[in-house]
Image (spheres, grey):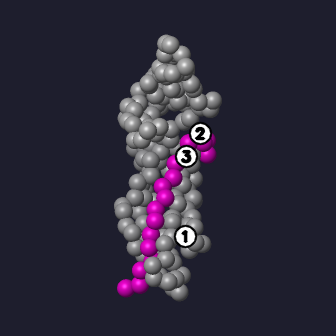
Amino acid sequence: TDVLLVEASGSAVVNGTIKSVGATEFLVNIDRIPEWAFVVQLKGLLNDSTQSLPSWFQRQSPTQQQGSRVTITVQPSSTIEPGIPFILNFTLVTNATGSSYTIQARTDRSFSVSFPSSLDMGTEGSAEGTVTLTAPSDTESGTDVTLTIEAEDPESGDSNYVALRFTVMTK
């Protein structure tokens, strides 16, 4: 059985490595995703006990997928203090130099968040930004909060996000 990522143009194919993780469950590892829009294709041999000979099958996803060309990286941190602004630096990297990405940041707990509205990638294809996250001063110690940072190129629609989980801890 093969799992393939096939560029919509048909010009490139990426093979996956299949690993059995249960009687009827499998994990597919992919080293890279195609640069352009692609479909997922599954090919294999069907061993049906009601038939004397196995038969070939092929299935393909009905929708095309597209990998993001922008990566968001942050330094890991796991705790914040109530009432004290926490500054988180992040970096955007893309192969699309000169583009501008719209930035959004939000939490699942309505904590105060400030961030730049956009970042210009410049000639190097990277930019740095800062998100400031503040938990209300009356937040209970042990409260978990998820911060999501999103970046989107409004011209191409290319986007990506990173979700970070923090625990509020009183010192």
Q: Is 46 a magenta residue? A: no
Q: Which residues are magenta?
A: 154-171
Residue 81 seen in render = no
The residue shown at (57%, 59%) is 104
Q: Is 48 positioned to the left or the right of 169 in the image?
A: right
Amino acid marked by disc 2? Ser
- Pointer 3 residue: 159
86 vs 154, nearest the viewer: 86
The residue shown at (49%, 77%) is 143
Amino acid marked by disc 3? Ser
- Pointer 2 residue: 156
- Pointer 1 residue: 113
Residue furthest top as drawn: 53
Q: Quadrant of residue 80?
A: bottom left
Please give the label number shown on residue 50.
none
Q: Is 169 a magenta residue? A: yes
Q: Is residue 21 above or below residue 7?
A: below
Can you tell which of label 3 and label 2 is closer to the viewer? Answer: 3
SS type, badge 3: strand
In whole angstroms, how far apart are the C-alphas of marks 3 and 2? 9 Å
What is the x, y in percent for residue 168?
45, 77
The residue shown at (47%, 31%) is 35
